[in-house]
Amino acid sequence: MNAPGPAVKEAAAVGGAAGAGAAAALAGERKVPTYCYQCVAGPDLLTVKVVDGVATEVEPNFCAEAIHPGGGKVCVKAFGLVQKTYNPNRVLSPMRRTNPKKGRDEDPGFVPISWDEALDTIAERLKRIRETGLTDDSGYPRLAASFGGGGTPQSYMGTFPAFLAAWGPVDMGFGSGQGVKCYHSEHLYGEFWHRAFIVSADTPLCNYLISCGSNIEASGGVVGIWRHANARIRGMKRVQVEPHLSVTGACSARWVPIRPKTDAAFLYALIHVLLHESARDRLDLDFLAARTGSAYLVGPHGYYLRDRRSGKPLVRDLASGAVVPHDTPGLREDLDASVTVDAIEAGADGEVLAEGPLAGETAFRKLVAHMAPYTPEWAAGVCDVPAADIRRIAGEYLDHACVGQTIEIDGRELPFRPVAVTLGKTVNNGWGGFECCWARTMLAVLVGALEVPGGTIGTTVRLARPMAQRLDSAKPGPDGFMDYPLNPTDREHWSARPNIRNAYRTMVPLAGNGAWSQALGPTHFSWMFLDGTPEGLPEVTFPDVWFVYRTNPAISFWDTHALADKMARFPFVVCFAYTRDETNHFADILLPDATDLESLQLIRVGGTKYVEQFWDHEGYALRQPAIEARGEARDFTDIATELARRTGLNDRYVASINKGAAGVPLKGEHHDFSLDPGEVHDRERIWDAVCRAASSELSDGAHAHGLDWWREHGFATRPFPRSDWYLYPTMVERGLRFELPYQERLKRVGEELGRRLHEKGMHWWDRQMAEYQALPVWKDFPGIWEAAIPAAGGKAGDYPFWLLTARSMQYAWGGNVGVQMIREVADNIAGHRGVIVNAGTAERLGIAEGDEVEIATPARSVRGRAVLRQGIRPDTLLLIGQFEHWATPFAKDFGVPSLNTLAPMSLELTDATGSSADIVRVSLGRAGR
């Protein structure tokens, strides 16, 4: 293990005392190691300076410089933790609602209560559920829970996941941003194709990057900024393709102001240039033949031609001229074959569509023909990017691809392809997300730049298993591709009775059925269907109890007025509260949260995960109390333990901790620190066992350091092989191919799902079923949003602008909008004070800088101040972040509007993966006109 040096040991030594809850009682000055994980760009490792028991400042943990990919630096949100801790608006005691009426205009009448009363009240509700039945008459869990921030709350909620595991069925599908805002299509298709829940460029080696809306300078944290700055100094050229000039575009080599929601057309044209206007031998033909399904023969009905005996897809061998199964030893695949062969073609539900002598051509030939119409001239008319620019970018991409070159990584010779394409929000989710993700991945495949040094790589898995080991999840599956946990679509196993309210298992095969799948279904269905369940699904009901932590869906989701109305009808809501906010306004019980600098947890760090967070080390970091918890705030582990005890679930709760629900299995190859399920264990005992198990795992049993050691040292790591950043070597070792370019399995799954739905009279998902295509075609994606205007009662011409939203590093995930320091920093960044409008557009409409303007849809309108900029398309408006708070102290006085108030939830704007995109057609004018 790599432990921090003497300087941190000395600084952190008193951190142990602070972690034991004695910081406030100790005089003097000390530094306590901990971490910040307020957004997915973390964690940042830091130290907190404590003077006489008071946290006074935050600084980087300089001993992490050598192992942290951002040089040990921390981002602005971490520097706000001191103000966050001492915020005078914090909820510091349990509170009970006294006004039975719930509504936005109703005063909840919260009054302080004791912890015993709060926990007894919650436990009584929970016990009543267990007596009645864990699921209701519709089959939905009576207990629901919502967590925000892309999974980051798991790094703060201690052992609460163990309590939920002990409980049984829990509905975690009430969205707070997932689905409608996250990188949704990328999550699903990325994992399906190359185990990439999040896709990144291999920035340290990449030389040419096409970034379609990926605002890495705002969303990538200090690691992203550090890496990209170093890459640009080294000579990497980054082309930023997006409708507005973001901070990322501003420091890129080129900004391409594309028309909103047309990125797929731009990417399709790049593929066209590579396939139809470039020499074929400039592509990585060996990669296409051996590592993809490009040589598989496709039959007349669009399915693979298969060997009669083995059922395996067939290819033509260049050496022998014979047509043989795809895994025949010594094979040299023919990419350009067009043959007639004795075979079988099977479609959905195993139905034999044809057999005997059948004509077939390779998937690659089909790809070439498919992309022929998508010329740069065609794309220019769609996306408003000149054809010459498209050809220039395609040529630069190909010039930088280094096809045929290799590089040595960890003593292994690997392909070197230093080009990549990354996608941002609204590009990789909603209608068009599938096409963009497919095109981005195909651009990598054509030059062999998928999962190799310098190219496009995945950084974590969340749907395939095991989640902690990305490479281990690449298990052999059907037809020479990777296995994937698709939800069943066959007659025997598909069910029209969903396990939770957003129906992900019924409607979205790609979402899988793992720990993260609930949040990757159509999470807005849970909200929408409360007022009317569509035909074929059991009536969507309100949960009896709803837990809410580190999320504020009344602000962060869409159609916020409708959400507020629905929240007001939830029978019993428990919110873990930092301050009052728009969601906990509807709570029945508020529990004060011991925040970042006041509570205890050990988490995994390093390896590869999220955006630019791919490290040369892996290990664990401890978050520990730097000070005594303020007021009556309690550590989340203490709360979870008490709930388990009071509901009679302690034995199951402890068993879940033993299995790894606290982040580390307590029994492993070299250790057994399991806790006795017959006892109630305090926080210190639980995390001491977790720390010992983590230490043993890292050292292969050589060490078993307990909590006190981790308090002193803060973190421990071991080297992580850089070659493990890349999936390519694993694919070669296991004889696997990437499931591209032809999506035969998805075509089959879509046909089966359509049949199942129609058998139950469910036709309201038919439009989405059209997305299950073997080779995706361009559709008029902007037209989908334009068509929503007449459907809402307006005239398309009256709403000529595209309203978009963009990431703010300062406000990312919205958990610190009430921190004054963050506001002061954010206000120095252009656009944070209002709506960004093209200066020419503003002049035409008679709008001046700072004027109050009204942005409207047929249903709603918002007001804000105009911020005039040249760096935005004339047909586009931009709001940074998500605001329009009405209950959160300090933030409610910002006067900044939100797209979420205007964005509707609708089936028409939902794609086949159950997602949509942050984009709305609006009108703009000076307020009062």
Image (cartoon, grey):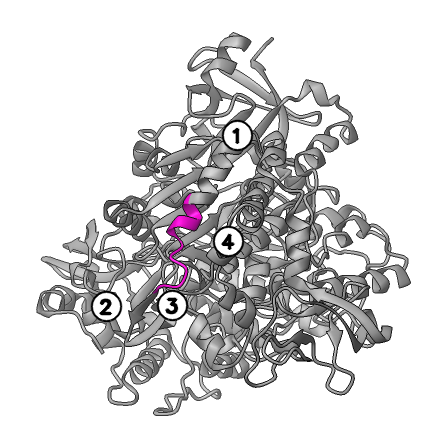
Q: Secondary structure at mark 2?
A: loop
Q: Which residue is mark 2?
A: 714
| Residue 402 within the magenta-colored segment of the rendering | yes
- Of callouts 3 and 4, the N-terminal one: 4
Q: Quadrant of the C terminus?
A: top right
Amino acid carrying mark 4 in the image: Gly
Expressed as whole percent of the image width and height from the top left, the position of residue 306 reads: 74, 77
Q: In the image as oriented, which residue stretches furthest toward the front? A: 320
Q: In the picture provided, is 582 more to the left or to the right than 41? A: right
SS for callout 1: loop
Q: Are the two marked residues, 1 and 2, in contact with CB atoms closer than 8 angstroms? A: no
Q: In this orientation, which residue lies closer to the viewer: 776 or 146?
A: 776
What segment carries the magenta color? 396-405
Q: Are marks 1 and 3 in contact (CB under 8 Å)?
A: no
Please state, as top left, top right, bottom left or bottom right, where the N terminus lies in the image. Answer: bottom left
Please tell me in which quadrant of the rendered image residue 499 appears.
bottom right
Residue at 27% in and 85% down: 704
Q: Earlier in the sequence, mark 1 or mark 3?
A: 1
Disc 3 from disc 4: Cα separation? 27 Å
- Secondary structure beneath dot 3 equals helix
Mark 3: which amino acid? Trp
Q: Is residue 712 magenta?
A: no
Task: Say which residue appears at 57% left-offset and 65% top-offset.
Answer: 193
Vertical relation: 259 (above or below) 198: above
For mark 4, what is the residue? 148
Give the Cα separation between the discs numbered 1 and 3.
Answer: 36 Å
Q: CA distance from mark 4 to mark 2?
A: 26 Å
The residue singled out by tag 1 in the image is 386
- Give the residue type at disc 1: Pro
Q: Which residue is mark 3?
A: 725
